[in-house]
Amino acid sequence: MNERIVKFKPRNQDKIFILNNILWNSFNIQWAENDTYQLSFTVYDDGSDLFKIITVESSIFFDGQEYIIKTLAVDYAAGVSIIQITAIHVSNELANFWKYEVNGGEKTYTVNDVLAFYLNENNKGFSYQVIGDFDKQQITDLGNTNGKDMISKILSIWENAIFYPDNRNIRIYNKKDFYQNKGKRLDYLHDTSEVQLNIDSTGIINKIRAIGTEHEVTTTTEITVTDGSSWGWPFPDVGEGNFMGSQLFGVNAGGEFRPNGFHDGLDFGSVDHPGSEVHAVHGGKVTIKSYMGGLGNYVVISGGGYNVIYQEAFSSASKITVNVGDTVKTGDVIGYRDTDHLHVGVTRQDFNVAVGKSFTNDGTWLNPLDLIKSGGSTTHTETKEETHTEKYFDDFMVEDKDSIAKWGEHPAADMSDDRFHDKNAMEAYVRSKFQLEPLISGTANESSNIKPDIGEIRRLEVKTVKLVTEVMIVGFTWYPFDPTQQTQLTLNNLPYSILRNNTNILQKMNEISTSVTKTITKLNGGNTRELEETLKKYIDNKLNNNTPTNPDTPKPQHIGKIIDVSEWQGIIDWPSVIADDVTLSIIRVQHGSAHQDLKYMENLQKCISAGGKYAVYAYFAATSTSDAQQEARDFYNRTQQVVAGKQQPIFYAIDVESIEMSGDVTQMRAGVEAYMSQLNALGVPDNKIVLYIANHLYDKFNLNVARPGAIWIPSYGQNDGTLANSLKPTHPYDLHQYTSKGSVNGITGNVDMSAEPSERFKELIFSA
């Protein structure tokens, strides 16, 4: 047995005390891979001052590690005061360390780079260490999150990473360096009295279509443009009329007074070309209407590759009747001349550039008379830019033929990733998401209460069914001060070879576990060899179908009460709950990733022990799609930490009742889709997922309600605990949560209750 030394340091004090008022059989440490690292115990009031100064945020020291008290449950009963304490490993204080700086843009990082960016020169006492090799990955805009988010990002991006700290030394291991075979074993009926294994093929993935991501491509081509021939005279009643040399375009007699003797346009005088209405000589769109010294009020009409300028004819802007943006056809009236002449200029250049060359004969300005008389049918070359999207690579299918041959096709949703521009790199990434064999997990109780070595791989033997394999210990609950309480181990990642040739062998083992336990009890500690032979003979009879079995009886169709519970219900008397006609209990596991429900482990264990049907739910609090995926992983892993190898939940419900995704309601659909897809990847199919959707936000969320197995909607009305005085949801539903003030035996205070299950919801319950 461990020496009973548990140290306590009050917050903001340096003095350390030894706690002696502990109920020693309550003291336990829980660890689960990449999830839980905490201890819990109960202290009683021994009359000392020390009992009075136990507060949250104080430190507990045990087994070389520091833990911070996060929750206290104080109970005063029968004249005795006790406090139930839960303390989280000190590494969780990363949540209180914020990195405000941002390393902007998409960049390539190693695990060490990420840790260094966050933790170098921190003032919280954190150091870091990387054990094993990791590849480089791309991350966009690293920073502006806390240290706990840093760990979540590392674990989500490097899926082979294990987080196992030593006090404030943050350690990230490569999985292959973390888990080691140290020569220990678990031998059923020798080292362990109970083994429960679960084989689950729902998570097999052996076929995924890879979708090439799109990017914009701009192409430039030169095209020959034939200019339109629709030209006309500004004063149609006169037509061409007569011009003096000084009115003509170019260098002509009479125009010597101009710089270089050059005239950049054609003048229509009020004597030789009478009339006030000015007509467009060429069609287009009005691009400029303004005033300039030397030009007076003027207007530019652009079309067919030409800019036509009308100037020196308008004494005020009001005399120009068209405005910028107007479309004009040849012959339309654009204004009224009230001066002695109209000057018309034509150029292909930008007007603001061409006006600077008004007296330069370099081809910038064109002869309006030639264009109007010839109809202006000319050609010119233009540069045309076209932007379109194309994929880095065509969509392609990735398959594992061996797995398909063995288990059939198990496709998953299409996969795309902006990080990959190379087909081979994308294929390797997709294959990393495959699960080619059934997932096998389970639990075992050690015969002793010795603390497991962290990162152990053990040889598991169940001789009675010739089962031999290796398992990783991915979690444990250890009672160091109570030799009567066995260490509870969580096992995972068993190779499929344990199935041998008898594919239902483990299922039959689970079916007879209750009978085996009764047999052990009857033998009451007799000779071990005799016990083993007796059990082997009993199990062989079962496996060889030598024991008659009753035909299946029809499943009951009665629907009783449906409740959902969380830590807010406190301590629940589960046998009383189940006896009060409760058909289904939906148990909260977490509120986002940040908060693990304080009672979920106890509720799951005791509900199962009481023989109740149950499902699990998690509150959706993600800020991004990657955050949603992490929440889904935490939801599943926390659930399996308790129920692996046991009765599985009927469904996983996602509680979507507030606008998350950093406050962007338009991203809620994408976030929930990412959450569901991650559950799919972990082995939870869509028909085992339920969406709980706030009635008043149903339309705004715009969720894909056709995807999950059922829709659960709250709508209370008077909220007096009765269905009769509730209001039905205003959207289609499979289950109606009608009150938060229901009551059942075994629960003190109010409890949420639901009713009116649809046929497909009933099928969920009765098919379990």
Image (cartoon, grey):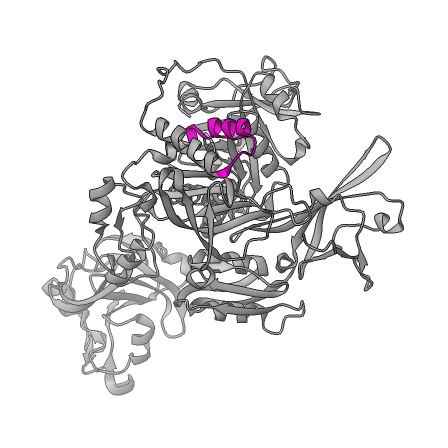
**Marker count (numbered):** 0
Q: What percent of the width, then of the height, locates residue 209?
A: 25, 48
Q: Main secondary structure of the magenta part?
A: helix
Q: What percent of the width, then of the height, locates residue 418?
A: 34, 58
Residues 103 and 286: in front is: 103
Quadrant of residue 548 in the image?
Answer: top left
For the C terminus, give its image quadrant. top left
Quadrant of residue 738 in the image?
Answer: top right
Residues 64 and 35: in front is: 64
Residues 272 and 487: in front is: 487
| Magenta stretch in the rendered image | 510-528
Specify whether residue 520 is in view: yes
Residue beneath the point at 89% across and 50% down: 49
Q: What percent of the width, then of the height, locates residue 315?
A: 40, 64
Q: Is residue 574 magenta?
A: no
Answer with left or right where residue 387 lies relative to residue 727: left
